[in-house]
Image (cartoon, rainbow, N blue to C red):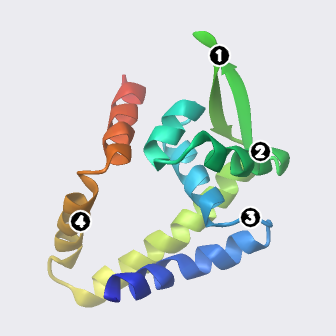
């Protein structure tokens, strides 16, 4: 129960912000991951989000039509589309993520102690079994090299 209400509070402001763009939380998630792995392929994004191609198709097209992302054929293989945020997309994603970072920063500061570390530990345990998390870690590592 607490997790549900905490999540609702965590997503409330960004949801209000994206409403102005005529997009939803799924679009926010897509922007979030493209921002962290610029040039991610559609297939890799599918794996990270753990969704079907059909579930991703419409939101991706909408982000493209709103000039928030670009899709480029990969140089290494023309069958793959790589995704990038446009300047407008970078601005929006940054604003959305900043709101949430500030929210968490305020909470951890008010609690003091090692609450942030404990929260990170809990989130890591919850996330580690997810195939999407494992794929994301792989993508981050590949983009560092």
Q: Are marks 2 and 1 in contact (CB under 8 Å)?
A: no
Rendering coords of residue 28 (x, y %): 61, 60
The label number, if any, that marks residue 61 in the structure image: 2
4 vs 1, front mark: 1
> Looking at the rendered structure, which numbered label has been put on residue 23?
3
Q: What is the distance, in whole Å, between disc 4 and disc 1 at their CAs? A: 38 Å
Q: Position of residue 142 (x, y in %)?
A: 38, 26
Identify the residue under disc 1: 79
Give the class, few, some or many, for how many residues have Cα within 10 Å of label 1's Cα (few <14, many ≥20): few
Q: Secondary structure at mark 2?
A: helix
Q: CA distance from mark 2 to mark 3?
A: 11 Å
Instruction: Tell me which label, 2 or 4, sits earlier in the chain.
Output: 2
Distance of label 3 from label 4 (alpha carbons)? 29 Å
Image point (46%, 47%), residue name? 50
Residue 73 location, x and y as percent?
69, 20
**Gap in Å between the C-alphas at discs 2 and 4?**
34 Å
> Quick one: SS at disc 4?
helix
Q: Quadrant of residue 20?
A: bottom right
Q: What is the C-alpha distance between the residues marked 2 and 1?
A: 17 Å
Residue sticking out furthest to the right: 65
Left or right of residue 41: residue 67: right
Q: Please name the residue that numbered disc 4 is placed on.
A: 120
The first of marks 3 and 4 along the sequence is 3
User: In which quadrant of the rendered view does residue 54 lie?
Assistant: top right
Quadrant (top left/top right/bottom left/bottom right) for the N terminus:
bottom left
User: Residue 70 in the image: x percent, y percent?
Assistant: 74, 36
Task: Give the residue at x 49% y 44%.
Answer: 36
Marks 1 and 3 sit apart, C-alpha to C-alpha, by 28 Å
User: Which badge, 2 or 1, is on the more N-terminal residue?
Assistant: 2
Front in this rendered view, residue 58 or 145 = 58
């Amino acid at each position: 129960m607490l997790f549900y209400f905490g999540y609702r509070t965590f997503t409330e402001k960004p949801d209000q912000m994206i409403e102005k763009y005529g997009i939803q939380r799924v679009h926010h998630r897509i922007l979030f991951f493209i921002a962290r792995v610029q040039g991610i392929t559609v297939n890799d994004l599918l794996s990270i989000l753990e969704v079907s191609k059909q579930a991703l198709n419409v939101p991706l097209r909408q982000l493209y039509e709103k000039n928030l992302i670009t899709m480029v054929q990969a140089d290494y293989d023309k069958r793959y589309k790589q995704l990038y945020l446009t300047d407008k997309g970078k601005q929006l994603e940054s604003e959305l993520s900043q709101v949430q970072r500030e929210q968490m920063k305020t909470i951890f500061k008010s609690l003091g102690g090692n609450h942030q570390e404990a929260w990170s530990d809990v989130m890591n345990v919850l996330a580690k079994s997810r195939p999407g998390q494992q794929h994301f870690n792989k993508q981050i590592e590949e983009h560092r090299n």
